[in-house]
Image (tube, rainbow, N blue to C red):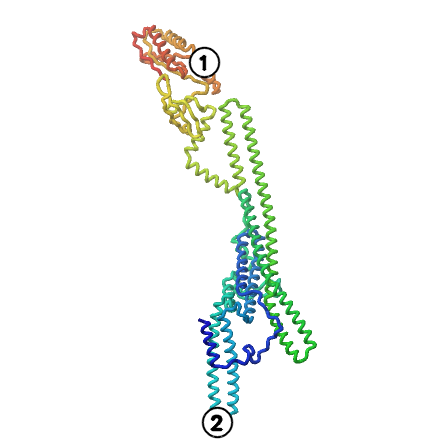
Amino acid sequence: MVLTLCLALHASVAAAAPAATTPAGQAAGAPAASADAPAVVAPMTGQQVIQILDQTIDWYRTLGLQQQAASEPSDLLILYDNRQTANQVIGLAFELARANAEILAKQPQPKDTGGAHPDAQSLAQLQNKFAAQAAQVRAELDAARAQLAAARPAQKADLQAKISELQGELELIDARESLLSTMSSLSSQNDTNGLSPSALKAQIDAMAVTAPASVGAPAASATPGAPAAAAPGATVSSTPASIASLTGASSIAAARYGIWDLAANVIRLSEKAAAINAVDQRTAALQATFAQLRTPLISQLKGLSARGDALAAEADTAGSAALEQVRDQLNALSNQFKQTSALMIPLSKEIVLLSQYRRNLGNWRDAVKNQYRNALKTLGVRVAVLAVLLAIVFAAAEVWRRAVLRYVQDSRRRYQFLLLRRIALWCLVVLIAGFAFASELGSIVTFAGLITAGLAVAMQSVLVSIVGYFFLIGKYGVRVGDRVQIGEVTGEVIDLGLVRMHLMELGGRGLSGPTGRVVAFANSIVFQVSSGLFKQIHGVNFVWREITLGLPAGIDFAAAKEKLSAAVTNVLKDECEEITRQSKEIQRATASSTGTDGQPRVQLNFAATGVDAHIRYPVHLSNAAEIDERVSQAVYAVLATLGAAESNPAAPHLSR
């Protein structure tokens, strides 16, 4: 559509006005361009300018990565210096982009149509023709006005009509030029080869608004190494009081001594070094980009300098007419040199600032490497100390085990010592590891207190049972195979665990046997007064029986006592030796001088109703029923000899 409109305008111009005789670019009073002067070539196209700005802004955002890695006071100082340098770098980048856009705006459009847009070429040709026509019409209008001033009255009417026609023609040409200017701007926005100069400037201004630093004005510095003045509206604080806010830390972190924190510190320093290397690589890439852009500018400045020297030598021998031309060429060279310098100076400053930036990063990297080596050394020493302590503990535990196996012959006592060794070993291991990995003693003590309180409340019964286990395996404790009585339950221990024990229930009067039921009791039974725990001393396997009977009146009570004692002793004569040995074992195990010799006893008790004889004798648990029966028969035989049948004595009463 734009091309059709341009062709229509071109046809109307060709029909309405004659061809221009004055070149479009040769306006009145305009100096002629020197054909020998080299044209200034912009080092970057519009797309390249945008890419360079994107790369620079992306590089600037690496300050956030450095801010996260900075944790030491020296890190904050380096970060502060890098931030100031980065502000200057990004400001110079926008200054360079604007200078490049100015050069692109002043460059003439290429005459060849190989890569140009056809609409833009047609519009440019029409603009040239309209400019030539406007110049021709203005010249005719000026001439007619001059003639009108000196014309006769008879000729003034014709001249005034001609002036009116020329003014209308000039207004029409101006209207067409305005239309072409609008169409040219639309065509430039639709340019497929890159950004137009106006669109490029607008894009640069938009990026400057969204840039992370103040780049509204070029960095002002007297020398390349001088710091840039802070631009109005800068958002980055440059006071020492704000250094702590760069990392969000208000104070230096306290020293940490635990292995866990030392390992975390080593990993953090390794990540910090990697982050610094990544930032340095991106800085080097940006510096290489600027160096690549500066290379053709250096060559161009050398060419302009050489051309200026040649013109100066030529002026020494030139005449007055040639001097005018040389002066025009020197002016053109001066303008070109200034335009090239406007690009060269920011690029040189960028390279110097980025070199300083990389030196700061290098110093920071060296400091982090030293910290990493020191942290790794400290971690290694702490791990070595932990390993040595654990080795000492395990060696002591092994010595303990061998000593127990060598010097403790009793298997039960050996088991107890080995169990105590295992508990002590792992308690020491947990304590050493806890103190080694903890950062602060107070934290681990608090943590251990909370854990202990929680376990004590939630597992109260289990903990009491575990404590009861150690009472059960004590000096007078129980073991598998012992016969015990807990409350009303009598049984044989078949399992003794850390929390509970299991009994095979024994039932029946006289000859006790397994009932087929297994009874489980928590080890906390040792702390319960109501039920109680009864067991035989290890190596003792007899119990005492009692028979109480009433003796008839009128008999010789002393003779009856002797007969009853002799009868019971005669029944137990085969068991007497073993029972005596077990009685001595009781005295030895309990370290007590009290006790009996294991012999049966007969005791007479005088009461208002008569005389009662209490017979007390020991029996083995394995044949208790048989012995009870034999003793009962012997007692009845004695009563028969004493005439007990006539006196109708009380029936014997057995008690255990």
Residue occupied by mark 1 = 578
| Residue 487 rendering spot, x and y as whole percentages | 37, 24
- Near-viewer residue (217 or 193): 193
Quadrant holding the C terminus = top left
Q: Is residue 651 above or below residue 85?
A: above
Residue 66 placement (x, y as % from top left): 55, 54
Q: Which residue is mark 2?
A: 154
Q: Is residue 456 above or below residue 180?
A: above
Q: Nearer the viewer, residue 518 or 206?
A: 206
Q: Determine whether, in the image, residue 326 is placed left or right of residue 138.
A: right
Front residue (pair 522, 380): 380
Query: In the picture provided, is 429 more to the left or to the right than 506?
Result: right
Instruction: Give the CA separation, mark 2 to mark 1.
Output: 175 Å
Instruction: Identify the amino acid type marked 1.
Output: Glu
Q: Residue at point 53% right, 23% down?
A: 408
- Image point (57%, 40%), residue name: 383
Residue occupying the far right of the picture:
317
**What amino acid does circle 2 point to?**
Ala
Where residue 109 appears, x then y in whole percent? 54, 71
Looking at the image, which is closer to me, 126 or 216?
Answer: 126
Tally of numbered tags: 2
